[in-house]
Image (spheres, rainbow, N blue to C red):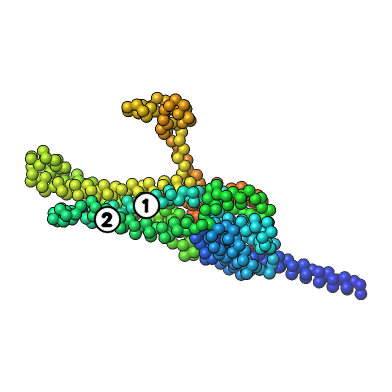
Amino acid sequence: MNFKIILNLIFVVGIAFQLQAQSISTKNIFWVHGLGGDETAWTKASEATALGMGSDFPRRDIDPVQKLTYNAISLNSAAFELDNEMFGSQASEGIENSFVIAHSQGGIVARQLDKLYEEGYSNRKFTGMVTFGSSHGGAQILNNKDLLEDALNSACDLSAGPVAEKTKGFFDERPLIDFFVNETEISNLFSGQICDGLVAAVRKFFFDAYEEPISEEYKVGASGINQLNAFHSPTPIMQFYGTERDDSNGPVIWKTMEYMINSNPNHHPYFTADDEPLVDDMNDKLLEYQAKYEYYNDRMDLMQDYSLGLVPCNWYEWRLSAFLCGLFNDEYWDSKEVRDAYKKGVDWWNSINTKYKVAIGATVIEVDRYSCCAAYLSGNPCYYTTTNPSNCYMNNLTAQVFSTTVVDKPSDGVVLKESAAKYLPNQTHPPVELEHSSHMQMRNDSNTKWALFNLYEGDYGYEFKVERK
């Protein structure tokens, strides 16, 4: 009799342990978006996790997908709202089986909420954090908004060529109009209107989010991010960072901008986000501007050939042959004006990537040596070079840049590797690189797939292991 009771007890305890194990295996994932995003930011990755994508990305044992949002007023305000959203969607499994997967700014907000939990703000809702492209060391792009503004405004150079081409010869054929209005002022008016429209369009899709008040708190050196990094969290954290590089496929700027002004990673099938469409479009535009420049340069050469080398004509050439100058001189100068206008566009295409990378901190121009010069003397003679400009000042000389070195830093096109991969207390694994993943692309590309697969398998810490279902 006692033996049967013991067997029954063993059976009941076994069932209880089995049920508990099944309960514990189910995880609750909070998906959190970044700056300027919303609850749809992780749509494809979260759906693939819940539904599975075949044998190479099996379905996982998670509660219904929890895609959360928050305001952009301040880090604390965003963290408070995120906590409220978590409270409304908290799974029955409890906090020990809940963790956050956050993109970009979302990772900073999650860390801020984690800090508030430790300070006793409210009951904890998660016990682990996973970040993709979060600027844990601060976002240099937020420190350099003025450089971004300059890069944006320089896009006005793109309108110069098309405007000059459209107005080419217009005033030559209408001398009375030219008498009453200034040709340059009219061209500048048209160019300015096009430029204003271009700037407004780009600003709407890219720059507005960077003006949100919350962004002031995690600039490099900002008190918000400094206080967060001074706090040593006991909560396990795993970091992923992207690296985009200039290569034969195109520059960093267009790979990054693909998902800021051209498309959305979630518009692609699961884990297939590609950054090539905008790169191809921009390369075609550059070739178009180069072709226009060469065409009008050839026109100038042609006018010189037709005029037997007289154009461009000054008073002497006009005296030699008013006929040839009259036929070809205006066309020569009109072609030069259009050629030079398209050259502005060509120069813009060739320089904008460097300007952008300087703004995000991915390109740093370091001064190697200075020339010590006598600015008060005629000709501003320079006498020697030094690595320390103070050596010039102590001799009453001015320091001028003599040589520089360009240093490129790895980034995802928005956040530097050194920031996204910054050492944080309680890392469960060294930060993992997502090679060729730009800042937005990393939410739904092939790297997202294997990063999440390995995460769920427990390769980056048992805290993030999610059983197959």
| Circles 2, 1 touching at the beta carbon (< 8 Å) | no
Q: Nearer the viewer, residue 90 or 214?
A: 214
The answer to whether residue 310 is above or below residue 106 is: above
Cα distance between the residues tagged 2 and 1? 16 Å
Q: Is residue 294 visible?
A: no
| Residue at (10% x, 47% y) in the render | 326
Quadrant location of the N terminus?
Answer: bottom right
Q: Amino acid at mark 2?
A: Leu
Q: Amino acid at mark 1?
A: Asn
The answer to whether residue 109 is above or below residue 12 is: above
The residue identified by callout 2 is 189
Q: Secondary structure at mark 1?
A: helix
Q: Nearer the viewer, residue 323 or 401?
A: 401
**Other residues around mark 2 within 10 Å, as few (<14) / some (14–19) / many (≥20):** few
| Residue at (40% x, 25% y) in the render | 383
Query: Residue 125: image x %, image y %?
Result: 66, 63
The residue identified by callout 1 is 153
Q: Is residue 183 visible?
A: yes
Query: Residue 120: image x %, image y %?
Result: 69, 59
* Left or right: 338 as drawn, with respect to 400: left
Mark number, residue 420: none
Q: From the viewer's perspective, is the residue at label 2 or at label 1 nearer?
A: 2
Q: Earlier in the sequence, mark 2 or mark 1?
A: 1
Query: Residue 336: image x %, image y %?
Result: 22, 47
**Other residues around mark 1 within 10 Å, as few (<14) / some (14–19) / many (≥20):** some
* Left or right: 50 as drawn, with respect to 325: right
Query: Number of marks in the image?
Result: 2
